[in-house]
Amino acid sequence: MDEQRAVLLLMLLSLSAASPLPSNVALNKATFSSGQNNKSRSSSVVVDGDQSDSFTYPSTGRFCTQCFLSTLSDNPWWRVDLGGQFFITNISIYTGAAGYIIGPFEILSKETSGNLNPAVYYSQWNVIQSVSKLDSTYEYPLPTAVYAQHVAIMEKKDPRNPEYQQRLVLTEVEVYGFGELYVILLFEFQLISN
């Protein structure tokens, strides 16, 4: 084994020992939304690592104390800034509300900052997946890794009821991926090994 391969192998092993599987790169990162219901937790509750929900029934109506609820609007959205660019391999979405259906919605990604409102600048975002409806949990292993710094969930107008506005309900969003350095080192090692 030559010196270059040995150095790359040691770097890869040290990175994989710290994180042999993709990690949740959205955990505790900055979040943003189109609007927040006054009975909702902040949009950051969606990346706190807690998939549980807690519904209460106060006299003013049912609401989730561990969820983010958007205001009623056309195409409500929620977004996380991953704090850097990552190769995303899997996305899990939890509504925590069995029986409460959201959808249709889209999972969107964007590599760079600027024009970050997906409803206004939709054409500048990449659609990772379109989902017709979700009533509890959605796990999506991407067939090909997506390179992005921002991931957004945007509920779309329901073509069956276009006159109604939507409300996005999220308990947790997990975005799994690898940092750029890990992927570059892995690629370099594979090139040298062949």
Image (tube, rainbow, N blue to C red):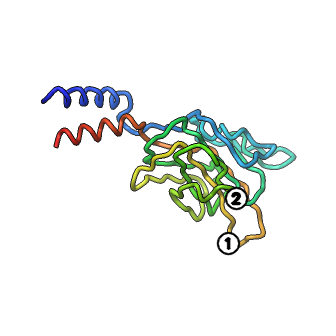
Q: Which residue is mark 2?
A: 75
Q: Secondary structure at mark 1?
A: loop
For disc 2, the neighbor class at 10 Å (few under 14, some 14 to 19, many from 20) is many
Q: Is residue 149 above or below residue 119?
A: above
Residue 55 position in % (x across, y down): 72, 44
Above or below residue 69? Residue 166 is below
Residue 159 is labelled as 1
Q: Position of residue 105 (x, y in %)?
A: 61, 60
Q: Earlier in the sequence, mark 2 or mark 1?
A: 2
Q: Residue furthest right?
A: 59
Residue 72 position (above or below residue 157)? above
Numbered marks: total: 2
Quarter-of-image position of residue 114: top right
Is residue 64 rendered to the left or right of residue 189?
right
Q: Nearer the viewer, residue 135 or 20?
A: 20
Q: Position of residue 115 (x, y in %)?
A: 64, 48
Q: Which structural element holds mark 2?
A: loop
Which residue is located at x 86 percent, y 47 percent? 60
Query: At 24% from the left edge and 37% from the top edge, which residue is drawn?
Result: 189
Residue 112: percent from left, percent from top: 55, 44
Task: Compare residues 1 and 52 and report the one nearer the observer.
Answer: 1
For residue 6, which quarter of the picture? top left
Please name the amino acid that badge 1 sits on: Pro
Classify mark 1: residues with Cα within 10 Å, few (<14), some (14-19) or many (20+): few
Q: Are marks 2 and 1 in contact (CB under 8 Å)?
A: no
Residue type at numbered disc 2 = Asn
The quarter of the rendered structure image containing the C terminus is: top left
Q: Nearer the viewer, residue 36 or 146?
A: 146
